[in-house]
Image (cartoon, grey):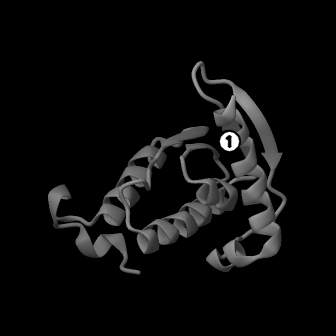
C-alpha cells in the first residue's frame, strides 16, 4: 500500500477513493478528538480497498485508542471493526439488538473466513431480518 505522503502534491480530485478516506481520517484526528464519528466512510470504495481501509482504521484505532462510532450497512464490516455492534431497526430508528464482538485484536481480514466470525454475522443478519419482517 502506498504511503499518503507520496501524493502530497496532488489535488484532492487526483486522489483515489482510498486516499481521500485516509486524508479524511487524518483531518479528523489532527484535532485529537475523544470520539471519532464515521458515517459510511468506506461505502464508495471497491471491496479490496474497503478491506485495506478497515485494516488501516483498526491500526489507527490501536495506536490512538479513540472511541469510534462507525455507522455502516455492511454487516461484515461492522463485525470486523467493532467490539460492540448495535443493530438499528426501521423508522423510527430504535436499537433492536446489541452484540459484543469478542474476537482477538489485531484482526486480519482472514478472520472473516472463520466460523466464529460468520456465526456473529449470521446473528446480526437474523436480527436485521427479524426487524424487517415486523
Residue 79 to residue 50: above or below:
above
Picture coordinates of residue 118 (x, y %)?
75, 66
Residue at the spot 68% in from the left edge and 42% down from the top edge: 128
Residue 88 appears in the figure? no
Picture coordinates of residue 91 (x, y %)?
57, 22
Q: Residues within 10 Å of mark 1 (few under 14, many from 20)?
A: some
Residue at the spot 74% in from the left edge and 48% down from the top edge: 126
Left or right position of 120 against 79: right
Residue 71 to residue 24: above or below:
above
In the rendered image, the quadrant that contains the C terminus is: top right
Please name the residue that numbered disc 1 is placed on: 128
Residue 3: image quadrant is: bottom left
Residue situated in front as seen by the camera: 52 or 134: 134
Q: Considering the numbered disc 1 on the image, is that residue within a helix, a strand or a loop?
A: helix
Picture coordinates of residue 25 (x, y %)?
44, 52
Residue situated in front as seen by the camera: 43 or 41: 43
Residue 18 appears in the figure? yes
Farthest residue to the front: give it: 133
In the rendered image, the quadrant that contains the N terminus is: bottom left
Residue at the spot 54% in from the left edge and 46% down from the top edge: 72
Numbered-mark total: 1
Picture coordinates of residue 26 (x, y %)?
42, 54
Residue 11: image quadrant is: bottom left
Residue situated in front as seen by the camera: 122 or 72: 122
Amino acid at each position: 500500500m502506498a504511503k499518503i505522503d507520496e501524493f502530497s502534491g496532488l489535488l484532492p480530485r487526483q486522489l483515489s477513493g482510498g486516499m481521500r478516506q485516509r486524508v479524511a481520517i487524518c483531518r479528523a484526528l489532527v484535532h485529537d478528538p475523544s470520539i471519532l464519528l464515521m458515517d459510511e466512510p468506506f461505502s464508495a470504495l471497491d471491496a479490496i480497498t474497503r478491506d485495506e481501509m478497515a485494516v488501516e482504521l483498526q491500526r489507527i484505532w490501536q495506536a490512538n485508542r479513540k472511541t469510534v462510532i462507525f455507522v455502516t450497512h455492511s454487516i461484515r464490516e461492522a463485525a470486523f471493526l467493532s467490539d460492540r455492534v448495535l443493530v438499528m431497526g426501521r423508522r423510527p430508528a430504535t436499537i433492536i439488538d446489541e452484540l459484543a464482538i469478542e474476537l482477538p485484536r489485531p484482526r486480519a481480514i482472514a478472520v472473516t473466513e472463520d466460523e466464529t466470525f460468520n456465526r456473529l454475522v449470521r446473528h446480526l443478519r437474523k436480527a436485521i431480518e427479524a426487524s424487517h419482517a415486523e
